[in-house]
Amino acid sequence: MKLRVGLSTCPNDTFIFHGLLAGKVDPRGLELEFELLDVQQLNEQLAAGALDCSKASFHAALHLAERYGVLRAGAALGMGVGPLLLAAHEGTTVEPGSRVLCPGAWTTATLLFRCLHPRAGRIEQRLFSEIMPALKRGEADLGVVIHEGRFVYQSEGLFLVEDLGASWERATGGPVPLGGILARLDLPDGIHAALCAALRDSIAYGYAHPEETFQTMQRYAQELDPAVIWSHVDLYVNEHTVDLGEAGERALATLNRLAQQAHLVAPSTPELRLLG
């Protein structure tokens, strides 16, 4: 079966998918056609029905829960992995009139910021890689930074205002569910399990062949420093990536509940279905 598969250009995704991208692991009888995009673009492609299976923000997954479920393999979830709120000037705080840059309306980073700072009203969406340069140019007061930005913001002369992930962990007592691999609920029997098995084989291949896998990660990364790329993988590829587990299931249920309470998703949003 031919499937249109999306993944982001971030090192954790290219690490996870390298074995499949390079044809080094068995795709379990599936013909996979890949597209690499920014995560917000992937969210939009899924909403348009242009992809059968794709990495997406868990915020987007809530909006798409009637059509897509979450594969148990491939997630970015854990402690100490959340987005950061940054500013160009030390001592900046979040005020009702603060101009805040976020990396996409359906990103989990935007959801976390809006849940934690409901009074902040001047939110503008930018491509994630444009947020730190915009802060340095003085185009906004604050910016929510994801991906490699966690590791390089200090060298860019920016200041940490708040670790949104740490705030979420304190508020919920659980890990931050950032994103995962969504798949159409109406795919034929056995496809979800085959996708999970192929992803787990690809993850194992990445660990077994780090030098080869690094070439793929570096080809697409925003930051080319090998230490930054591997730090990204060490943080975002963990036991939850192999299987969401009970902690992951609870984290997704919490995300849904708090998003509904904050009126960021419809009050009738169903629980996310876990697949594979």
Image (tube, rainbow, N blue to C red):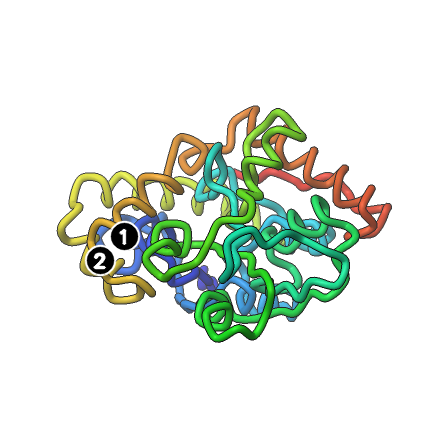
Classify mark 1: residues with Cα within 10 Å, few (<14), some (14-19) or many (20+). Answer: many
Name which residue type carries label 1: Ile
Residue shown at 38% from the left, 45% from the top: 199
Spot occupied by residue 78 in the image (x, y as percentages of width and height):
48, 34
Q: Between 126 and 86, which is closer to the camera in this rendering?
A: 86
- Identify the residue under disc 2: 225
Residue shown at 56% from the left, 65% from the top: 40
Name which residue type carries label 2: Asp
- Please determine whether, in this image, residue 264 is positioned above or below residue 88: above
Q: Is residue 16 left or right of residue 115?
A: left
Q: Is residue 78 left or right of residue 221?
A: right
SS class, disc 2 = loop
Spot occupied by residue 34 in the image (x, y as percentages of width and height):
39, 66
Spot occupied by residue 236 in the image (x, y as percentages of width and height):
40, 42
Residue shown at 22% from the left, 58% from the top: 225
SS class, disc 1 = helix
- Identify the residue under disc 1: 229
